[in-house]
Structure formats: structure tokens, C-alpha cells
Amino acid sequence: MEKIKMTTPIVEMDGDEMTRVLWQMIKDELLTPFVELNTEYYDLGLVHRDETDDQVTVDAGNAIKKYHVGVKCATITPNAQRMDEYHLKKMWKSPNGTIRGILDGTVFRTPIPTPGIKTYIPSWTSPITVARHGYGDIYKDTEMRVTEPGVAELVFTGESGKVMRETIYNFECGGVLQGAYNKDTSIISFARSCFEFALAEKKDLWFSTKDTIMKKYDGFFKKTFEDLYENEYKEKFEKAGITYFYTLIDDAVARVVRSNGGMIWALKNYDGDVMSDMISTAFGSLAMMTSVLVSADGNYEYEAAHGTVTRHYYRYLKGEKTSTNPVATIFAWSGALKKRGELDGNERLTQFGQFLEDATMETIADGVVTGDLAALMDPKPQSVTSEEFIGGIRERLAKKLGC
Ligand code: NAP
Ligand code: MG
């Protein structure tokens, strides 16, 4: 078979620990034998981030803006323990946060339904995508611990000189307080990414907040979605046969549980953080959840939703063969290749991405699975190592490609 060619590069961001090991295996076994991989490579491994004072992360984010498609391996977000372990110059910020900041996008997380694994909620027959706003709110908050009586105020001083002031609370004792914000530009781009993604996926879009309590804050999110829908997306949605639906978050939680799934559920930053863990667990395994960051101006970054699987990596370093699940990382690659194919009109590449996903799911359906999946199955199959699992996918993929 002649290898599949790529006209435009995708931005490849390497990462850390066990996922870095899987990354190389996936490239060697499932990609480069079949595709003339055209990537612009950025090493986001912690060692190299430290060497470049994290400039490499910023460069990678900007490269995604240039080529519009990126694929990222999981990376370590340093904490105090990692500072010692890697002798870091600084506690570098989360690369995902940095890239989200550059692209100002929305993170869409979707579980991959797995043959042989029942969802915890039996009515969920289609995957639910959580669309998490990736900017601001409590993740950029300012907090205070106060230890005496006093007045806490919210003060805004406009460039024009206009001052707005509200009393938060008259403390009669010590307490805690917090200031959070979001920006018009980011909220609009969140709403737009969600509408665009719903159209691209042909799925209903739900949005929920707590606007009965946060009348101004969440009220503005709600109004932004409503206005954009009425003015720009209503007709497009009707034509595509999909709906937009807003409801209070409490009501949404109850309705989602009773639903058959299949919708995109847009949530503010914190709500999305929490709900995506609930959704992924309910569908099976964290290792079976894909994540794509989409910006309103059409940039896509694909990754696995899980981390670097540190515990497995330490076992790998001792020479053990681990049974780490590479599926979400494989789907990050297939997602990026399919998107590249779609943007470039490269049908062979798009088809390759689809074959890769099909071969992966067929391998699982044939009972060849990693330990995390085996544990969820009844009866439990014997689990295989990551290498054996990837080998199984390669065999099935090669057959589909006729080689
Ligand atoms: P994690 O890497 O997702 O792993 C947590 C546990 O979940 C693992 O120990 C493993 O359980 C199970 N697991 C996750 N992915 C798996 C897979 N592919 N195959 C099999 N089992 C899997 O989360 P963490 O341990 O909290 O974080 C480790 C590092 O990842 C941290 O340094 C963190 O900063 C980073 N992180 C990065 C990202 C990202 O880049 N997007 C996201 C989250 C965390 P068992 O050990 O029980 O088998
Ligand atoms: Mg979380």
C-alpha cells in the first residue's frame, strides 16, 4: 500500500510519563506504517518545558492557530512534589490552561461507548458530550481569608472614573471570601463554539446555569446564548433538525439522568469540570473519554481526557509491562487526522482516521482489552498488555487498509 500523504501539518505535542510511552507506540505501530505523518513537533514533556521556561507551550498554542489542528499527549501539571522530582526552575502552569488561554476555546468531552461495558444509567444509549467553558470563573478567582470583623466590598473602578460598589458582607467574625470574573468576549466565543460544534455533530445543544441565584453573572451567560441563537443559529438549527434548549442546572441534571443521552451539554467552567467526571464514570472508564478544545475561529486541539497515568509509569520504569489503556490517546490522533482530512479535502486521511477508530473498537469487541476495561466486564476477560492491545489494533487496521 502506498502511504497516505498529508498536505498540511498538524501540531504534535508530546507529553509525559506513561502517556509519552504510549504516544511513541501509537506512532510506531498504528500511524507511521500507513501514513506519511506530517507534523510540527513540540515537546511539552516537563523537562523540555522547564528548559525553555515554558516557551514551548506558548509556541505550540500559537502553532495551532497557524495550522488549525493539534494533537496533544497528557502532560504533568507541576505541584510541590514534581518541583523536587524534576528539579524545576518554577512551578510552571498547566499546559492545558496555557493553551486554552491562547485559543480561548471550549472543551468538548465525549465518552467512547465500549462494547461489553454497560453504562451505570441504563437509559443512556448515546454518549453525552460535556462542553466546558475553558476560561475564568473560580479558576481565575481572588480569594481572602479574613480573621476579624469588618466589611467586604465589591468595587469596580471604570476607566472613565465611574465607580461601582456593593457590600458583600458585614463580617461580625472571621470568614472567607472570593472574587471571580468572566469576559464578554470569552462568553460569546463559548456560546459560538457550542452552536458550531452542535451543527458539526448534528446533536441537540443543552445549556444550563444557576441564573436564578446569579442573576447578573449567569444571567449574562444565558442571555448571550439566547441572543446568539435567535439572531444567528435558529434557522441553521431548524435546517439541521436539532434543537437548542436552556434550563436551570438542577433541572438539567434531573433531565439528563432520565434522558437517552446523545446531547451536547454546555456548562460553565466549574460545572463542566465536575459533570464531566460524573459522565465519564457513568459511561465506564476515564480512559475511554476524548477531549477536544474548539475555538470560535475554528482551531481544534485533540487529547485524551485522562492524565499521564503516573502509577503505571513507575511500574514501567521498573521493567514491568503495563496494561495501560491507549484508546483515548488513539482517538485524539484519529480525531486530529480526520479533522485535517476534512479541512484539506483529503479523503484518504479522513477514512484512515475512521478505520483506526473502527479497528480499535473491533479489537475490544473481540475481547482483547486492557485491565481497566476487563475489570468492568462481566464475565471478565483476561487482560492484555498495552503492546498486545495495540498489536491487535494494528492487525485489524492493516486488514481494513488492504495490506
Ligand atoms: P490520571 O493520570 O488520569 O490517572 C488516575 C488513575 O486513573 C490511574 O492511576 C489509573 O488507575 C486510572 N487511569 C487513567 N488513565 C488510564 C489509562 N489510560 N489506562 C488505565 N488506567 C488509567 O490522573 P492523576 O494520577 O491524577 O494524574 C497524573 C498526572 O497527570 C498528574 O501529574 C497530572 O498533573 C496530570 N494530568 C494531566 C492531564 C492532561 O494533560 N490533560 C489531565 C489530568 C491529569 P490505576 O492506577 O488504579 O490503574
Ligand atoms: Mg476535574
Image (cartoon, rainbow, N blue to C red):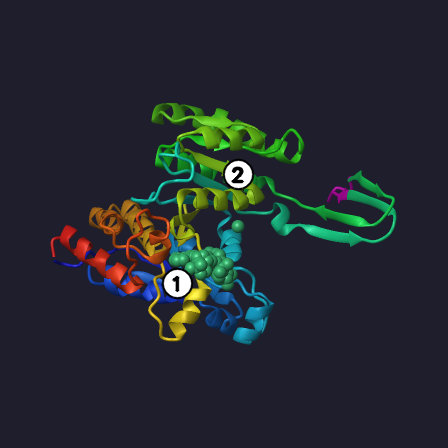
Q: Position of residue 396 (x, y in %)?
A: 18, 54
Q: Which residue is mark 2?
A: 267
Q: Is residue 230 above or below residue 16?
A: above
Q: Please state which amino acid type lies under the numbered disc 1.
A: Thr
Q: Of the residues tagged 2 and 1, which is closer to the observer?
A: 1
Q: Is residue 79 left or right of residue 152?
A: left
Q: Is residue 115 left or right of residue 58?
A: left
Q: Please report whichever mark, 2 or 1, sits nearer to the chain's N-terminal start.
A: 1
Q: Residue at x 57, y 74 (%)?
A: 84
Task: Count how many numbered circles sit on residues in the image.
Answer: 2
Which of the image's four quarters has the C terminus?
Answer: bottom left
Q: Is residue 208 above or below residue 108?
A: above
Range of magenta residues: 155-162
Q: Which residue is mark 1?
A: 19
Q: Residue at x 51, y 48 (%)?
A: 104
Q: Is mark 1 within 8 Å of ligand 1?
A: yes
